[in-house]
């Protein structure tokens, strides 16, 4: 068994985008005449609910219970979310959002060594494209063989659906992949699908429970921007590279898979 593919989460993993999402939500709320404002604390709480439509719906039912009918929510919330997605794209196009330390380096290294890149996220395909297309980094959408987005499956993270779909589309065993995540929901989703997972937590997920992850760090790191490791044997390395990911993957396979399956 050998590492064949890296599967990336998007928000919080590829880039620190959650503040841009929060800004887009708040601007659309105000534009449409609602006095809702999601503070950093409120949005941090709401991020436990994956998916933008689901997040707004949860907010209305918990913070404004009984004020909005199910029919109103079913009609209005998707419209509101489409407007928010467009605003998010506009904010990204204005510049200022770069990929997190180590992402560009790791993607280039993986491509040079023949690994497949994929995405498994709860956000929409439009949001993924907006981030990557407007990033000043060299990473491009066509680098990713499969883009599993939140609008593809019925159940979002922490359900395993998006990872199962992505692995199926790749056509390789889950055990030959490594997921790169930033959140509890992401770890739960990937590991339930049988994909070993590495966490680089974000500003919104710092302190979450990452039990089951192969390793946890504050970023992948870059030369001059060392990663701070919480778990995972990283030897003398101060950043996460493919050699380290392969080491963690081999150790996981040796300790987690039934005898004889590592070579299957």
Image (cartoon, rainbow, N blue to C red):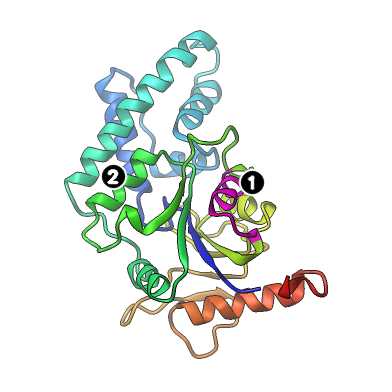
Residue closer to the observer: 74 or 108? 108
Instruction: Report the residue at 58% width, 64% height from top.
Output: 177
Residue, x 31% and y 82% (percent of image)?
224
Q: Which residue is mark 1?
A: 160
Which residue is label 2 attached to? Answer: 130
Q: Quadrant of residue 49?
A: top right
Residue at screen point 48% across, 77% down: 242
Horizontal and vertical percent for residue 184? 59, 53
As helix, strand or loop, the secondary structure at mark 2 comes to helix
The kind of secondary structure element at disc 1 is loop
**Is residue 154 on the magenta stretch?**
no
- Give, as a single range, the part of the protein colored magenta: 162-174
Instruction: State the quadrant of the C terminus.
Output: bottom right
> Where's residue 14, x and y in %?
39, 58
Horizontally, residue 160 falls left or right of residue 255, namely left
- Majority secondary structure in the magenta region: helix
């Amino acid at each position: 068994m050998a590492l064949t593919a890296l599967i990336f989460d998007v928000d919080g993993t590829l880039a620190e985008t959650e503040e841009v999402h929060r800004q887009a939500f708040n601007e659309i709320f105000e534009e449409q005449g609602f006095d809702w404002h999601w503070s950093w604390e409120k949005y941090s709480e709401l991020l436990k609910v994956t998916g933008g439509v689901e997040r707004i719906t949860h907010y209305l039912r918990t913070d404004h219970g009984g004020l909005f009918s199910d029919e109103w929510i079913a009609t209005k919330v998707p419209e509101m979310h489409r407007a928010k997605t467009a605003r998010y794209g506009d904010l990204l196009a204005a510049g200022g959002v770069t990929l997190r330390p180590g992402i560009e380096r790791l993607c280039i290294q993986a491509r040079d060594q023949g690994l497949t890149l994929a995405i498994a996220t709860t956000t929409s395909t439009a949001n993924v494209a907006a981030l990557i297309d407007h990033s000043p980094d060299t990473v491009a959408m066509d680098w990713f063989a499969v883009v599993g987005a939140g609008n593809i499956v019925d159940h979002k993270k922490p359900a395993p659906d998006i990872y199962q779909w992505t692995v199926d589309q790749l056509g390789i065993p889950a055990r030959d992949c490594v997921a790169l995540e930033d959140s509890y929901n992401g770890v739960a989703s990937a590991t339930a699908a049988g994909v070993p997972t590495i966490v680089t937590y974000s500003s919104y997920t710092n302190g979450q429970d990452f039990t089951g992850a192969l390793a946890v760090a504050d970023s992948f790191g870059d030369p001059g921007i060392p990663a701070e490791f919480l778990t995972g044997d990283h030897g003398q390395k101060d950043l996460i590279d493919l050699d380290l990911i392969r080491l963690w993957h081999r150790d996981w396979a040796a300790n987690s898979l039934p005898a004889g399956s590592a070579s299957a």
